[in-house]
């Protein structure tokens, strides 16, 4: 049993590092690098939104592709392929300044991050479950926060060197390459096989399930506006480069234990209530990031964004799985589609609103409203006690 536990811990560490590379850096390093790109390349807020949405479209396509049975037995190879691609694509972002190239590279990076997300989860969770250590799942997801914090520290160092936006991408690639090597060594095998694949039944035609799927899409829109433009909001407010990195660091450090914390809350109040509460807390952060001036608004925005969005992503999937326990792959695909659509529309809408209004205030208020509605709908979908 002891060896099973040590194996579970080793795979959890591998999962954390893989999530840090593919998600915390691969997907979200765009946020702290974006203000420099907008300034030096004269990118408009609308163009910035399109680049972000290309990444989320790639993630949506990748998640659907990864959900098929064709990958069975190839999970480790595909996960490492996704990590390697994420590393190379980060470097390519720093070697071009063409809009079309940015769109294509970020689309492919989104696809790579989805492969890492899906296949690494299947590997890590099989070893965790074999050891009876389901509690370690939360730390696997905490890797997103770790990656955000590492990228913030990287940006703070680059600021002291007066480095440009391209250096941010090239350094991200160097960090990702180190992470790739560590993951390849720690995750030395694929998932533990659990017999033959079983054909899943159709999803139940249930009003509560439909509500959760819709709410998850609204959350995708609501969180992604601040997650994409938070550092650009700080730059627009006249904050220093060091303060920009500090805000993003706070978001990452808050994200690290957030899933573990919210799982504890969910055990007390129920999944749906915890999801709704986390959405309402995130609303405060999203609003504060644009409504409060000085240091307090962005710092509160970073703290409450980081402390909720990773956990809400996990809580939403769990709430949906509770409604359809016999069809986990089908419900994962549908929830990912809803979430993905919200994520794709969010940055485009926010970029266009920011371009029209001259700042990110209106876009952030629309995002906050989406989070409120998402929380209310999910709360109303809670299973009724007999």
Image (cartoon, rainbow, N blue to C red):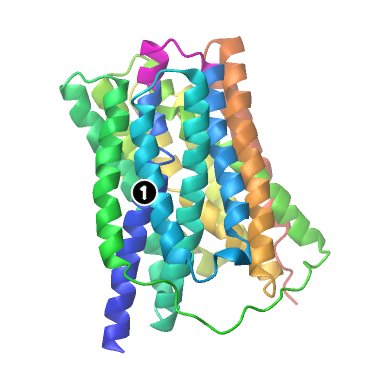
Nearer the observer, 90 or 376: 90
Q: Which residue is mark 1?
A: 84
Residue 251 drawn above or below residue 310:
above
Per the image, label 1 sits on a secondary structure element best described as: helix
Quadrant into which the C terminus falls: bottom right
The percent coordinates of residue 82 (x first, y second) are 43, 51
Q: Quadrant of residue 137?
A: bottom left
Q: Nearer the viewer, residue 169 or 336?
A: 169
* Residue 88 spot, x, y in % from top left: 36, 39
Hey, which quadrant is residue 204 in on the image?
A: bottom right
The answer to whether residue 264 is visible is no
User: Is residue 38 located in the magenta-colored stretch of the structure?
Assistant: yes
Q: Is residue 92 magenta?
A: no
Magenta-colored segment: predominant secondary structure: helix
Residue at 67% in and 73% down: 325
Region rendered in magenta:
35-45
Whole-percent x, y for residue 91 in the image = 33, 33
Whether residue 373 appears in this view of the structure is: yes
* Horizontal relation, residue 275 to residue 310: left or right: right
Residue at the far left in the pictured view: 161
Indicate whether 74 appears above or below 241.
Answer: below
Identity of the residue drawn at 43% across and 22% down: 233
Q: Position of residue 343 (x, y in %)?
A: 59, 38
How many discs mark residues in the rendered view?
Answer: 1
Location of residue 86 with respect to 183 vertically, above or below: above
Residue at image position (52%, 69%) is 267
- Image point 27% across, 51% down: which residue? 179
- Image quadrant occupied by the N terminus: bottom left
């Amino acid at each position: 049993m002891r060896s099973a536990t040590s194996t579970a811990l080793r795979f959890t560490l591998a999962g954390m590092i893989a999530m840090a590379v593919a998600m915390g850096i691969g997907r979200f390093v765009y946020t702290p690098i974006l203000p420099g790109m907008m300034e030096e390349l004269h990118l408009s807020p609308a163009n910035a939104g399109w680049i972000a949405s290309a990444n989320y479209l790639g993630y949506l396509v990748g998640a659907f592709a990864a959900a098929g049975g064709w990958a069975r037995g190839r999970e480790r190879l595909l996960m490492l392929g996704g990590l390697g691609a994420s590393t190379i694509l980060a470097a390519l972002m720093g070697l071009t300044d063409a809009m079309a190239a940015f769109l294509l590279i970020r689309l492919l990076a989104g696809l790579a991050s989805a492969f890492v997300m899906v296949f690494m989860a299947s590997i890590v969770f099989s070893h965790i479950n074999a050891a009876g250590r389901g509690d370690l799942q939360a730390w696997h997801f905490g890797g997103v926060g770790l990656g955000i914090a590492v990228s913030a520290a990287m940006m703070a160092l680059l600021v002291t060197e007066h480095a440009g936006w391209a250096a941010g991408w090239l350094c991200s690639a160097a960090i990702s390459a180190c992470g790739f090597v560590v993951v390849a060594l720690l995750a030395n095998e694929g998932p533990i096989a659990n017999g033959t694949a079983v054909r899943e039944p159709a999803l139940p035609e249930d009003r509560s399930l439909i509500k959760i799927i819709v709410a998850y899409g609204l959350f995708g829109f609501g969180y992604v506006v601040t997650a994409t433009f938070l550092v650009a909001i700080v730059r627009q407010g006249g904050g220093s480069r060091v303060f920009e990195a500090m805000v993003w660091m706070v978001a990452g450090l808050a994200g690290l234990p957030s899933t573990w914390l919210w799982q504890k809350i969910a055990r007390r109040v129920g999944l749906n209530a915890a999801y709704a509460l986390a959405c309402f807390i995130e609303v405060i952060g999203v609003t504060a990031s644009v409504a409060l001036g000085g240091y307090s608004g962005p710092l509160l925005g970073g703290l409450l964004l980081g402390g909720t969005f990773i956990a809400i992503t996990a809580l939403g999937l769990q709430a949906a799985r509770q409604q359809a326990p016999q069809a986990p792959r089908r419900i994962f695909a549908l929830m990912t589609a809803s979430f993905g659509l919200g994520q794709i529309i969010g940055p485009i809408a926010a970029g266009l609103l920011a371009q029209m209004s001259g700042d990110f205030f209106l876009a952030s208020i629309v995002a906050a409203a989406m989070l409120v509605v998402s929380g209310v709908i999910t709360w109303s979908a809670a299973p009724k006690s007999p």
